[in-house]
Image (cartoon, helix red, strand yellow):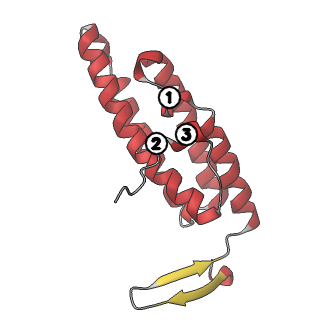
Amino acid sequence: MLSHLTGISTPILGIQWTPVTADVTTARNLIRELEDRRVLYRPEEMEGHQYCLISVEQIRRNLTDTIQKTGADTPLGKSSAKMRRACRKFCDIVGSPRFDAFPFPVKKSILSRELTRLRKVFGLAIAEVSTAYGLDVEDELATIIPFNQD
C-alpha cells in the first residue's frame, strides 16, 4: 500500500492513495454482487426469513473470497470484514432454532430488526468502498447508504 501513497495532509491527518487495479476490479465486482441482493434493500414484507438466510450466507461467502483476494489490511478487506461480521450476527439470530419456535408476529418483528441492523452496517461499508475505490452504486442499493442530512 505504501507504494500507492500519493500524499499526506495535515492538521487532522489525511492520506491519499491510489488503489491497486486488481483491488478496484474486486471492489467493483463486490458492489455489483451486492446490487443484486434484494435482501439488502427490498421491504421486509417482500422477503421471507428463509430467503434472507440463504442470501446472507451467500453474501458472507463472497465477502470471505473478497478478503482472501485483497487481504484483510486493505480498505476493501476491512469493509468486507465488517459486512461479514454483520452477516454472521444476522444468521446467528435469524438462523437460530429458537427463531422458528416464535409465533409469526414475533418472527416478523425480529426479522425486521435484524435486517435493519444488517443494512445499517452494509450501508456504511458500501459507502467506504465506493469512496475508497471511486465506484458508483446503483440506486436501489444506494438507498441503504446513510447520507449526512445537515
- Spot occupied by residue 124 in the image (x, y as percentages of width and height): 44, 52
Q: CA distance from mark 1 to mark 3?
A: 10 Å
Residue name at image x 40 percent, y 38 percent: 118
Q: Secondary structure at mark 3?
A: helix
The answer to whether 97 is drawn above or below residue 26 in the figure is above
The tag on residue 95 is none
Q: Residues within 10 Å of mark 1 (few under 14, many from 20)?
A: many
Distance of mark 2 from mark 1, alpha carbons? Answer: 11 Å
Image mark for residue 144 = 2
- Of labels 2 and 1, the one closer to you: 2
Provide the secondary structure element on which disc 1 rests: helix
The answer to whether 115 is drawn above or below residue 108 in the figure is below
CB atoms of marks 2 and 3 within 8 Å: yes
Quadrant in which the N terminus is drawn: bottom right
Which numbered mark, 1 or 3, is in the foreground of this view? 3
Pick whichever of labels 1 and 3 is earlier in the sequence.
Answer: 1
Residue under pointer 3: 141
Q: Earlier in the sequence, mark 2 or mark 1?
A: 1
Find residue 39 and name its label.
Answer: 1
- Label 2 and label 3: CA atoms lie apart by 6 Å
